[in-house]
Image (cartoon, rainbow, N blue to C red):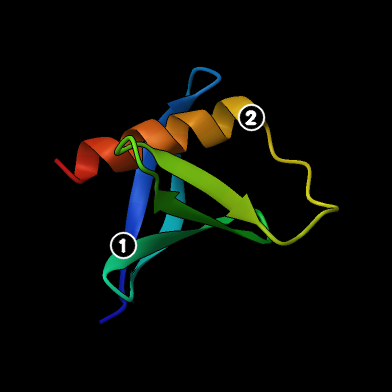
Amino acid sequence: MNEAFVIQVTWQGHEKEYKARFERWGYTHRISVLIDETVVIFEPDEAGDYRALSFDNKAEISLELLRALSVRIAQLST
């Protein structure tokens, strides 16, 4: 069951929207987020937070943006 939705975050004083998709992954889940033209995968870690994975080594994505998205995803999951 892959469900598409939009994640809204405030970053650098602006409200931003990013397309996302919930994906079942074995006994857990992942959330794929499209940032510009790069897919970043957020998955829960052992502490219950979300870590970001990207397979595009050339993408330059701000760590602050990734943190803001991680926090917002954690808020949505509670």
Residue farthest left in this picture: 78
Q: Residues within 10 Å of mark 1 (few under 14, many from 20)?
A: few
Q: For residue 56, which numbered disc appears in the image?
A: none
Residue found 56% across the figure and 19% down from its top: 12
User: Which callout, 2 or 1, points to the residue nearer the camera?
Assistant: 2
The residue labelled by disc 2 is 63
74 sits left or right of 35 in the view? left
Residue found 85% across the figure and 53% down from its top: 58
Question: Compared with residue 29, is residue 25 higher up or lower down, i.e. above or below?
Answer: below
Identify the image quadrant of the N terminus. Answer: bottom left
41 sits left or right of 39 in the view? left
SS class of the residue under badge 1?
strand
The residue labelled by disc 1 is 5
Q: Position of residue 3 (x, y in %)?
A: 28, 73
Question: Compared with residue 67, is residue 2 higher up or lower down, i.e. above or below?
Answer: below
- What kind of residue is marked 1? Phe
